[in-house]
Amino acid sequence: MLIGGVRTAVRWGVAGLATAQAGVIATLMIADRRRRRSRQHVAFPTMPPQTMPADETEVTVYTKGRDLYDDMIAAIDAAEHTVLLETYIWKADRTGQRFKRAVTAAAERGVAVYLVYDWFANLVVPQQFFNFDPRLNVLRHRPWTGLRRFPVRAPGLNHRKVLVVDGAIGFLGGYNIGSEYATRWRDTHMRLVGPAVADLENVFVDYWNQTRSKNHTTLAQPDQRQWDSPITLARNVPSLGVYPIRYMYLEAIDRARERIWLTHAYLIPDDDLVFALVEAVERGVDVRIIVPAESNHVVADWLSRVSYHALLSRGVRLFLYQNAMVHAKTATIDGVWSTIGTANIDRLSLVGNYEVNAEVLNADIAAMMEGIFTMDLGNCRELTLEEWEQRPLAAKVSEGIIAPLRPLL
């Protein structure tokens, strides 16, 4: 009887918590919808594309979508042999149509075009938009294949944003394809020209060959990859259970001796990452993190706040980006190490999704990234521990209710 009573109490407790969580999430989403309707677009600081060599590879960093899209389209328009395009979100708006026309025109002039897009992320996009010319090779990534394949692939969204043209020019970073991202979001992307492009091409080729259907062509591996490049690529591959990006961050944070400057759209670190950041502060490292004051995912905003006290109370400095969505996934450490990529610091990105980050060991690139961080800092306000502790009781209760969902994101 006692055991049965305990089980009943547990069931009711779980049901009650789930109901409370649903109520909090519904309230947050309603409030967020109202906020979005009243939001006015405000200009935010950006820089023109900046180019710097890293040994034999030329690196260009973008902070404005319009500049990036122009250069991506120009690369596609100049393609002679291959276009490899992989994206998470592909909107059917003016910018999305522009990219569709560019890849179609490339195929019409005899270029081999290979496209990958995530099925789940584009459920809200009219599906007729994805009716491509049959000359294009198109792979729609589904996060779960059920039992149709063996071995069964691990579930995971394809969150990558990659373009490789002719094996000579490569792009990767946080930008999806859409008009809103061109001017209203602050994101970071990079272009590679030179030997490091072969590694980015290999990222696409490996994914394509591992997930293609029998009707798709097998892609040849690039043969120009280097062992000693200052630019390396860390890629998460759920189908193989490989998630190196998390360890890349942990190792870089552990090596830091002077400063760790992070910019992340969704900051939901696990306990190991929180510990690593706090430990860095304790050994005298200046740890600063830029996050959006309000992101495009209100639930992620609230889940990220669960870790704020642990960070602020131990000396990590948090800065809230104002009046725009900062979607970048970047870091620079000690004026030596930098990363630009697609992975957020959350469970979905670090141990769930297909992701790719460039890891760059180059002082000039690090100086460029520090300049961008300083520019963004000028559009932020610092969140102090005192301010955080004075937030309303209702906010604290809501955070406590949804905190158990944190491991899911």
Image: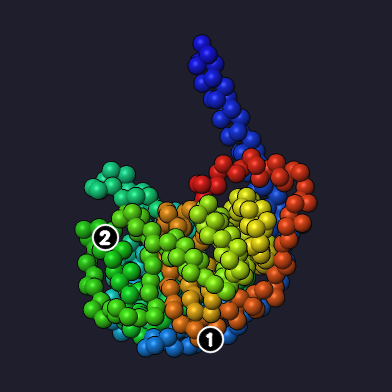
Mark 1 or 2, which is nearer the eye? 1
Whole-percent x, y for residue 220 in the image: 22, 72
**What residue is shown with label 1?**
50
| Residue 351, quarter of the rendered image | bottom left
Q: Nearer the viewer, residue 276 or 120?
A: 276
Q: Is residue 45 visible?
A: yes
Could you tell me which residue is drawn at 37 percent across and 50 percent down?
A: 155
Q: Nearer the viewer, residue 121 or 195?
A: 195
Whole-percent x, y for residue 275 in the image: 54, 56
Q: Is residue 117 visible?
A: no
| Pointer 2 local density, CA inside 10 Å: few below 14, some 14–19, many at least 20 | few
Whole-percent x, y for residue 317 in the image: 66, 64
Could you tell me which residue is drawn at 49 percent across and 75 percent down?
A: 338
Report whether 320 appears left or right of 265: right
**What residue is shown with label 2?**
210
Could you tell me which residue is drawn at 61 percent across and 30 percent down?
A: 16
Given the image, on which type of amino acid does mark 1 rest?
A: Gln
Q: First in sequence: mark 1 or mark 2?
A: 1
Given the image, on which type of amino acid does mark 2 rest?
A: Gln
Asked if 348 appears above or below 224 in the picture, the reply is above
Report whether 77 appears left or right of 218: right
Whole-percent x, y for residue 332 in the image: 53, 74
As helix, strand or loop, the secondary structure at mark 1 comes to strand
Tag 1 near tag 2, CB within 8 Å: no
Q: Nearer the viewer, residue 50 or 92?
A: 50
Asked if 167 appears above or below 13 in the picture, the reply is below
As helix, strand or loop, the secondary structure at mark 2 comes to helix
| Pointer 1 local density, CA inside 10 Å: few below 14, some 14–19, many at least 20 | some
3D distance between C-alphas at marks 1 and 2: 35 Å
